[in-house]
Amino acid sequence: MTRRLHLNAFLMGVGHHEAAWRHPRTEPRRVTDVRHFQDLARIAERGKLDSVFLADGLALWGNVRHNALGGLEPLTLLSALAAVTEHVGLIATVSTTYNEPFHVARKFASLDHISGGRAGWNIVTSAGEAEAHNFGIERPPHRLRYERATEFLEVATKLWDSWEDDAVLADRVGGVYAETARIHPVEHVGEHFRVQGPLNTQRPPQGRPLLVQAGSSDDGRDFAARHAEAVFTAQQTLEEGQEFYADLKVRAARYGRRPEEILVLPGISPILGSTEREALRLEKELEDLIIPAYGVAQLSNVLGVDLSGHPLDEPLPEIPERTEGQQSRLKLVVDLARRERLTIRQLVGRLAGGRGHRVVAGTPEQVADQLQEWFENGAADGFNVMPPILPAGLEDFVDHVVPELRARGLFRHEYEGRTLREHYGLARPASRYAAAADAPPQEEPAVAVPS
Amino acid sequence: MTRRLHLNAFLMGVGHHEAAWRHPRTEPRRVTDVRHFQDLARIAERGKLDSVFLADGLALWGNVRHNALGGLEPLTLLSALAAVTEHVGLIATVSTTYNEPFHVARKFASLDHISGGRAGWNIVTSAGEAEAHNFGIERPPHRLRYERATEFLEVATKLWDSWEDDAVLADRVGGVYAETARIHPVEHVGEHFRVQGPLNTQRPPQGRPLLVQAGSSDDGRDFAARHAEAVFTAQQTLEEGQEFYADLKVRAARYGRRPEEILVLPGISPILGSTEREALRLEKELEDLIIPAYGVAQLSNVLGVDLSGHPLDEPLPEIPERTEGQQSRLKLVVDLARRERLTIRQLVGRLAGGRGHRVVAGTPEQVADQLQEWFENGAADGFNVMPPILPAGLEDFVDHVVPELRARGLFRHEYEGRTLREHYGLARPASRYAAAADAPPQEEPAVAVPS
């Protein structure tokens, strides 16, 4: 079978460019409008994209004075997108740092049922201090967050497996709804969690949702190599992309996984025009709408250094390394500034487009060239597409780049599968408890009624 | 204005009768089928009902060998119902015992945005031991659960209020998305929670979701009297209904609330037939499908006494009072058995229909008579309708009882409002922070990007 690339549409408010909300082709009040996101999901489905993705954080990010923030909680929103689509996968970020595995496993199982097997979970740890303060604690250290994430996922997986696939008999006449020998308490006792189980939602269509990960730290890569089936990443150059791609596949092999079991999807923000000139004009329009103070504040935060006193048109000063927070993002940003000798203003402009992800301005053919180059040279199995303005940027991508990719034999013409796992060519996992089906039936004790 | 009654459709699996799943007019595999629930929501909307309601628990309830359990998480499901309806309110149970107020406030704010102002929250505390064991702790005592619930609601309310209504300016030209002086950190520091805020979702259309409550204990009634806007309750006789209704309105008055600010909705399971005989036949059919061992186990659990050794056709033995768990439900069940001198088998049969709620078998006129009697005699502001089988029982109610209520001038012909609060005739609450709008603008520090 020809190797085909995979496309995820990363939906963020009215666009990934920081100034998107000021552009005349967006409607900045629509960040809380479900119809806006339903339109986007339909556009992605029209393009036969593998999935859409909603990021998340657990505090009010950035400076809402100068950006269109305060949108909807992703899982709640994805359900409403499931209701108006049939094929496109639905991926949400949910943090393992301030949640309980029982709740999260159940919500993803529910979304997977609701969508007919289209749910995906982008597993993150929450690094922000403001997030910690919404949950009454101090921010846990990096290592501890990843330890918790690992155990969290283990518990969630046990819960998804707790109902075997054929547990439900629905035998009206015999009076047996489910074979209780095929529903298993998980009895997890660990460092961070004690969870009895079973889950109170039947095993979802995909067995487990697609597992996605996006951390780039050493812990993050290791977590991805062990557990993730798709990885979102931010790489600026082909070389960086190749390094990351190779590193992840090697790490995965150490855990006994085959390369095709973990898909690498670098982020790319395509700024499209029917001519290169038109694309560059859009890029310039967006750049001119940037509010420098906002960008400098964002940059200061990523770098952990207050840059507000520095002249905008001079190079980035010396930046100390961080021991906590977004370390890999810091390195990416500093490397970019040094490599291209950018002033603070230029760096702000570069980051405004994709927050450290690659920005490519050009015609559909030029963008397709870039995708093809990475895909065919060991840097990508597909892409996390981050349109600068929404919905226009996604429409342009679907209507002009996708046909170009098809013409080159790189992308599907029609959905061939039904579930998100099928779109990504990934197997449906079996329940870990399936072999135990011969055990004697266990009667669950009857308990009180729901309220 | 004529006083009109309110109707909520309580949606539970394929019906409220314990044996519903064995009845030929249900499809017991549909408990995980979103289309089943979408059909139900559409039927409720066709009847112009105020709302639909999904109960919840955080463990696998009852004995899944003999009942159709393992359905979907309510909030996730309601979003998918919002997408296919326009008017009907959407109420979900979410527990305050094993959740965080930031998550819950945000999810309800999101559902309220997604549904255009139709979200309602049935606030519960989790009394089950199996629930506690899914969250790694021992069950907290009753009083502590209610203390936590009270503070939980306080935090959630602050979070919903944290964005004032007019905080978003979306001024593209001036580059001001939101007026930060109108977005408030909540800085809650209490016994159970420390939450900085603000919420990262804009103020929802209803200001706050409709607040619903269903506890009948003294703590539960007091909580309802202070906070609830609609109350689900289980009362068997008109006298009990009147007592509860009067008690709740008196308690509410003590908190400075007017009687119409808290609506009392007793549960009723209508077993309908076009003749009384047909209704009784359906009741008998369902009764014959009960699995006695299942009913006895359920009853044992409610009573805290193992009845499996007792002869089915003898009266209920002496039952000790409970100090923990569903105390008010125990009293209701014991009172019912004593009052009507029921055997264990008969009691199981009576509880199978509505788990302690009132069951009325009859023609649409007879059921309407019952509703009218309670409504006009100080026992109800409306009803929590619990069809024995779904969807058939809800269709019968909407197609036959609702028109009868309309003919009597007791129920709306069309929706007059757009939001759930409007359906129930309740005011939209102002943000507690609105008066503070003259305070100097506060710049939120820029923080890292969502992941």
Image (cartoon, coloured by chain):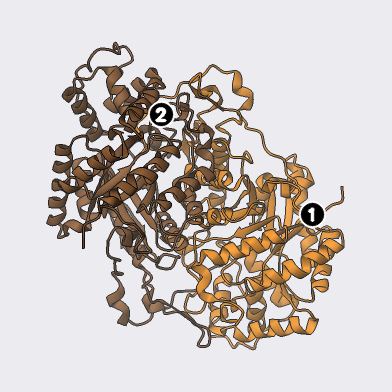
Chain colours: A brown, B orange
| Residue B137: image tag | none
One can see residue B76 in this view: yes
Could you say which is closer to the camera, residue A121 or residue A268?
Answer: A268
**At 31% from the left edge and 22% from the top edge, which residue is drawn?**
A348
Where residue B205 sits, quadrant-wise, is top right
Relative to B384, residue A437 above or below = below
User: Which-is-in-front pick, marks 2 and 1?
Assistant: 2
Find disc 1 in the rendering and name its residue. Answer: B246
Query: Are the two marked residues, 2 and 1, in contact with CB atoms closer than 8 angstroms?
Result: no
Q: Where is residue A341 in the image (x, y as percent from the top left)?
A: 19, 20
Q: Please state if A287 lies on the left or on the right of B154 as rendered.
A: left
Name the amino acid type tagged 1. Ala
Q: How crowded is mark 2: few (under 14 residues within 10 Å), some or many (20 or more)?
A: many
Q: Where is residue B22 in the image (x, y as percent from the top left)?
A: 57, 81
| Residue A62: image tag | 2
Relative to B67, residue A77 above or below = above
Q: Where is residue A345 in the image (x, y as percent from the top left)?
A: 30, 18
Q: Please state if A416 lies on the left or on the right of B34 as rendered.
A: left
Q: Residues within 10 Å of mark 1 (few under 14, many from 20)?
A: some
The residues tagged by marks 2 and 1 sit, at their Cα atoms, a distance apart of: 50 Å
Host chain of mark 2: A
**At 87% from the left edge and 62% from the top edge, which residue is drawn?**
B408
Could you say which is closer to the camera, residue B144 or residue A177?
Answer: A177
Name the amino acid type tagged 2. Gly
Q: Please state if B354 lies on the left or on the right of A169 as rendered.
A: right
**At 25% from the left edge and 54% from the top edge, which residue is drawn?**
A409
**At 36% from the left edge and 52% from the top edge, which residue is drawn?**
A49
* Quadrant position of the C terminus of chain B in the picture: top left
Could you say which is closer to the camera, residue B60 or residue B400?
Answer: B400
Where residue A58 sits, quadrant-wise, is top left
